[in-house]
Image: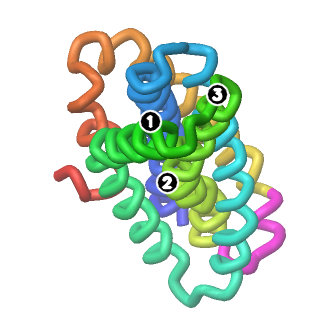
Amino acid sequence: MRSRALGYSALFFLSGATGLVYELLWVRLLYQSFGSTIQSVTTVVAAYMGGLGLGAWLLGRRADRHPRPAALYGRLEIAIGVFGIVSPAVLGLARHAYVGAAAALGAGSLGSLALRFGLAALVLLVPTTLMGGTLPVLTRALTGTDRAALKRWLGRLYALNTLGAVVGAALAGFVLIEHVGIRAPPCSTRSPGPACW
């Protein structure tokens, strides 16, 4: 149990770190579309928090009934990794869809802003929902149906995930995006999943 707990603890840490790397990457990508940091940050934070909540609720319930939650976690990480690889292209397509729709609708500045926000948030809701499911699914994989183990581990695992998020934010903000750019980080972020390896 101890070696398994250490392995799961490392996954919780890495999951938190990579989630924040993605969040900052998406802010930079949306800045290219919106041309405004505040709109980019607002869109990403709204989609991120909404997706985390939705994923925890939907996928957490599924993890309770899944016979192999560790396998479900692996599939979630692979899907997130794949989306990370294609996210610059998908957000670029959303930008082109926005340009076409805005021209057709003749949207004013408020309508234009709402359209950009809606398209970007819709695109980001997919990976953030998957990310939201990782914590409850991995918790279920570690503790099973043992409520005593859940009480013992949940706080520690959440703390590790949050610590990973702090490290991921610092790594993305000061190293990856600055020195590698915004096109390469997706393959260096979703470490737990093998999609980039």
Residue tagged by mark 3? 108
Q: Where on the picture, by quarter, is residue 49?
A: top right
Instruction: Indicate the position of residue 54 as horizontal and vertical percent values.
Output: 71, 60
* Residue under label 2: 127
Residue 106 visible in the displayed image: yes
Residue at 48%, 75% in the rendered image: 72
Residue 145 part of the magenta-drawn span: yes
**Which residue matches tag 1?**
22
Dot 3, crowdedness within 10 Å: few (<14), some or many (≥20)?
A: few
Q: Is residue 171 above or below residue 26?
A: above
- Tell me: 135 left or right of 119: right
| Residue 96 falls within the magenta-colored stretch | no
Residue type at mark 2 is Pro
State the extent of the magenta-drawn residues as a range: 143-151
Residue sitting at 60 percent across and 67 percent down? 137
Contact between labelled residues 2 and 1, with CB atoms less than 8 Å apart: yes
Who's the residue at 45% across and 20% down the image? 31
User: Do we see residue 168 in this rendering?
Assistant: no
Q: Amino acid at mark 1?
A: Tyr
Task: Give SS at disc 3.
Answer: loop
Badge 1, how many Cα within 10 Å: few under 14, some, many 20+?
Answer: many
